Amino acid sequence: MDPVPVTEVASIIGGTVHFPAEEREVGSVAIHSDRLQADSLFFALGGATDGHRFVGRALANGAIAAVVAADRLAELPRDAGPLIAVADPLAALQAMAAWWRAQLTATTFVAVIGSNGKTVTKDALVGLLTGHRTTYGSPGSYNSQLGVALSVLQCPADVPIAVIEAAATEPGEMARLARIVAPDAVVFTNLGSRSVQSFGSREAHARELLIMAAGLPADGWLIMGEPDPAVHLQARDITKARVLPVGDPALPRLTRLRHVEHASLVRAALPDGAAEDLLVATPSPEVLTDLELAMGAATLLGMGSAELLAAVAEYTPPSTRMQMWRRPDGATVVGELANTDPLALSSALRTARSLMGAHGRTLMIIGDPLAGLDAERAEAMARCLRAEHVQVVCGLTAEAHGLIEAALRGAGVEVHRFPDEDRMRAFVATELRPEDVALVHVPRDTMVTDDWMHLVETAAATRLYVDLAAVKSNVAAFRKLVGPHTKLMGVVKADAYGTNPVIVAHTLREAGVDWLGVATTEEGVALRRAGVQMPILVFLAVPGDVERLVRHRLTPSLYSVEMYDAACRAAAVSGRRLDVHVEVDSGMHRSGLYPEAAIDLLAKLRDSEHLRLAGLMSHLGCPDDPAEDDLTREQLKRFGTVCAAAADMGFEDVVRHTAATAATIRFPEARYDMVRIGLGLYGIQPSTATSSLITLTPGVGLVSRIVEIHDMAPGERVGYGGLFRAQAPGTRIALIAAGYYDAVPRAFRKVGFVLVNGRRCDIAGTISMDSMAIDITGHPDAQVGSDVLIFGQYAGFSSPVEQAAAAMDTVSHELLSQVGPRVQRIFTQH
Ligand SMILES: *Cc1c(COP(=O)(O)O)cnc(C)c1O
């Protein structure tokens, strides 16, 4: 939102100001006392944690004022700072969002409502439009009373299109959300089949959802994914806008021809007669339905056929709700968050079945005790399992599972029940055959990976574990170090240091990181295609990329005059203003413009119609090395002169940044307005000079397995070059299924050891492409199948990445980025 004086905010939200302070301008809102920007207004919200307890902390962290409930005013310290008292802080936040929405008269707001598929539809629409016009999408599945308000407040002033997801779980909620979003157009995905609970009937549920469309302008539209004609009639009653059910000749059609591997071959037919057969990267018919709705909305928003077809071919669906792993033996494990809604369940089952081999079976594994499931719903679930031809159902001894078993009796479905998950898992692990598909249904708040990944782990020899909870706690540690006003950029180049950029990006967003940094345009585009909406800086885009940067709202760093010229040309052609950061070479001599050349460029930018200077950056050569601190200070001094010149030229709101992990920790003066953290996200220290200054949580571990054991006679030699020689009788050598193609470089030999059950075993001989040998003499617990920790953390054992890198004369960055494609990445969230 644009800045507004605090007293004006008070009148917008109908509050009274207590203990007034100087008149400052509010430019953002915060609901976490530790995640403030310099211009944040803090809202003390209720809920699981009472925001009023954090008012003092928010003000101490620099919040302009705190919005509190009038009836809690007496409890709050008088001297903490300015307070605005309102009847209900959440309603006040919503009023502020409604006010900001009303300012955005040039933005077309599209609301996405319905029971299922909202987030997929919204992300697909944003993804399709992103190459066409700048489009803002509400983050993740922010769709609640709070989420919608925050989504609208975060919408930038100059975007042509905003897509906002909204959900109602109780009667009356949609009217509040409709006042905030005031949509120009609505996409209604479907009504689902669980209306009765809170709304009484399907009709009442539809009526509640359709309130979002009640105020649509006459030239607006409502796309109806729900096929029920009765709901279409209800819709036509409630709005004067055009109601277009799927199948209307004004909308594109998407027909699935067949599935191909993990994708679908579809025929796309557009209203203007254009048609094409395309491969879309999802096996799920429901995702295709959502995509079809998004295509309809994109068409009505003016996207041309050729452009739309190209965007559909490039569409990547989100993988957050469903995760799929193919085991080396050919069996597939699909993890899905438990949803007992029959529509959602059959959708998941159908997707799972499409991954099944010709001779495979579908196994349904119910890991959620499904507490509270009644006989009627158990019967509905059982019907669905029968209809989707599930052959084996594994459940717990929970009561609800008994009801499902009873309902399946006589249907020819094999049902097994277990007293606990461990036993169920052991059964499934032996039962699962190549070509089978297991659909694992787990409760909403446990990540599928946590327990059930075991089914895949047991099959994948070499695994890189990434602990997302550690990543979040490291973000919090950096946030604490730099304070609430310095922005955090998460650097996710090189596949997020060998992990997975999309999964890490989503985690970083949840942890409150503001920006992402990548090295290449491809990396940025891949994140956009996967639905990542955060601002993204591309360090090393090349001049030929600029048009794609513009289309995908990626911010380039201008490190040369050629990049500047290319950016000017592309921005002029697109007619859109492009934000850029200018990179200054302050002495590292890697990339960037020398200070004088950078200042010349600033002069050009000041007069540029097409480019806006949004940031100034530099990179430091040796901030991790105390012996070179003079050089670091000299670099910072040179960068400072460019910043001063920019200020003299009247540039405002320029984000200045120079620090990666090491400089962030060692040089507070290098932090400026933003820090760029890569290695530190994984809890790895850049050097011994940083480790005493910040405590990080190590979050990665490379683990493989013993596949074979040999007894060696004295004098026998091992491996290429025969470098290891058995000395004494009783020498035992184990072969590990990881070599230099997988992440263990030949130089790893210098590290000397790995850990088996926490005990050191020496490396025996040279490391091969696919395997390496270790000496397990005197370690009776090292057996075929034992896990071997190569570096990092695993199962409570640790072999620091930093030490391995140091022994190999390299940096941890190199070790991580060499984790090869054969290694299974496993994300945990403990
Ligand atoms: C890689 C990189 C970073 C991150 O460095 P870490 O040491 O991993 O924190 C920051 N800025 C730029 C320009 C980079 O290339």
Image: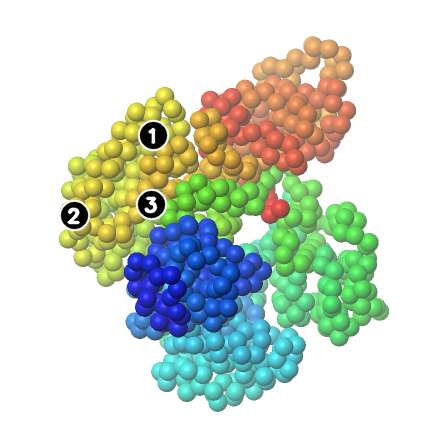
| 398, 92: nearer the viewer | 92
Mark 3, residues whose alpha carbon is within 10 Å: few (<14), some, or many (≥20)? some
Q: Is residue 209 above or below residue 358?
A: below
Q: Residues within 10 Å of mark 2 (few under 14, many from 20)?
A: few
Say if 774 sits above or below 395 in the image.
above
For label 3, being within 8 Å of ligand 1 is answered no
Which residue is the site of mark 2? 649
> Which numbered disc flags the more N-terminal residue, 2 or 1?
1
- Mark 2 and mark 1: Cα distance apart in space: 28 Å
User: How far apart are the two marked residues, 1 and 3, measured between alpha carbons?
Assistant: 20 Å
Of the numbered discs 3 and 2, the one sitting upstream in the chain is: 2
Residue underneath mark 3:
673
The kind of secondary structure element at disc 2 is loop
Which residue is at 41% across, 50% downward? 61
Which corner quadrant holds the N terminus?
bottom left
681 on left or right of 727: left
Q: Which mark is residue 689?
A: none
Q: Secondary structure at mark 1?
A: loop
> Which comes sooner in the sequence, label 1 or label 3?
1
Residue 28, horizontal then vertical, whole percent: 37, 59
